[in-house]
Image (tube, rainbow, N blue to C red):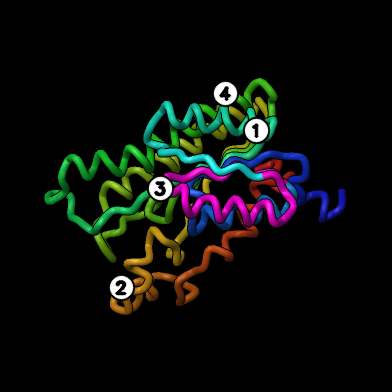
Amino acid sequence: MSIATLFSCEGRVALVTGAASGLGAMFAQIMAEAGADVACADVDRAVLAEVAASVAALGREAVAIECDVADEQQVRRMVAETVEKLGRLDILFNNAGIGQRPTPLHQLATEDWQALLDVDLHGAFFCAREALRVMVPQRSGKIINIASVWGHSASSRLQPCPSYNAAKGALVNLTREMAYCYAPYGINVNAICPGFIKTKIGDNCSDDPEWVKQAVPLVPLGRIGLPSEVKGLALLLASDAGSYI
């Protein structure tokens, strides 16, 4: 198999949640560049249309689907619309998420805790479950959950974000459970755990010189990353190049 074929997603359909900006927009683009048709989903429909247009400009089929992943019924509709309009579902980038304003646990309001878990954990569960209901019968598929470095370690060395850390830590272990459970069905499940990446979810921090001054010493490369620097890993996990991962 040639390198081009190994990394090709030709003939496949990818669904990207949180596709309107940041890593989500990049995932949609790399899937289109690799030959996949793409369903772009987000709560921000206006910006979402621009991302779908960029996919179409690469010669691929694209649909823009407005969806709040915290709403179970909207997620069901999103997956059904993807299959209806694009014919199948092969790859899910489970990317939609929100951040938390730095707050120590003893000061965290219950509604703020719940709001983040509703999107970052429950939303990821809803999306994975509906995608698996398509992928299990076809006995193939790729699910890439977008977790975080804070899914593996505490963030309070920089800023306290207990609900975000709890959600991403749970998503990391949920990924392990899914990977073992669905490997016999030919479905690969992996998580990407980005470090500090300059995206919309982190702009309030990554544009703050004081925050950057505190964050950069925690990064071995000594700088904040860019969404484009996650492209290669995303393509590896979505393509046949990652078939044994």
Residue 153, image x and y in percent? 36, 54
3 is higher (above) or lower (below) than 80: below
Q: What separation in Å lies between label 4 and label 2 (alpha carbons)?
A: 42 Å
As rendered, which of 170 and 224 lies closer to the eye?
Answer: 224
- Secondary structure category for the residue under label 2: helix
4 or 2: tag closer to the N-terminus: 4
Q: Residues within 10 Å of mark 1 (few under 14, many from 20)?
A: few
Say which of marks 3 and 2 sits in front: 3
3 or 2: tag closer to the N-terminus: 3
As rendered, which of 162 and 26 lies closer to the eye?
Answer: 26
Which residue is label 3 attached to? 97
The furthest residue to the left: 107
- The amino acid type of the residue labelled 4 equals Arg
As rendered, which of 243 and 133 lies closer to the eye?
Answer: 133
- Secondary structure category for the residue under label 1: helix
Which residue is label 2 attached to? 211
Q: What separation in Å lies between label 1 and label 3 (alpha carbons)?
A: 25 Å
Which residue is label 4 attached to? 133
2 or 1: tag closer to the N-terminus: 1
4 or 3: tag closer to the N-terminus: 3
Give, as a single range, the part of the protein colored magenta. 36-61
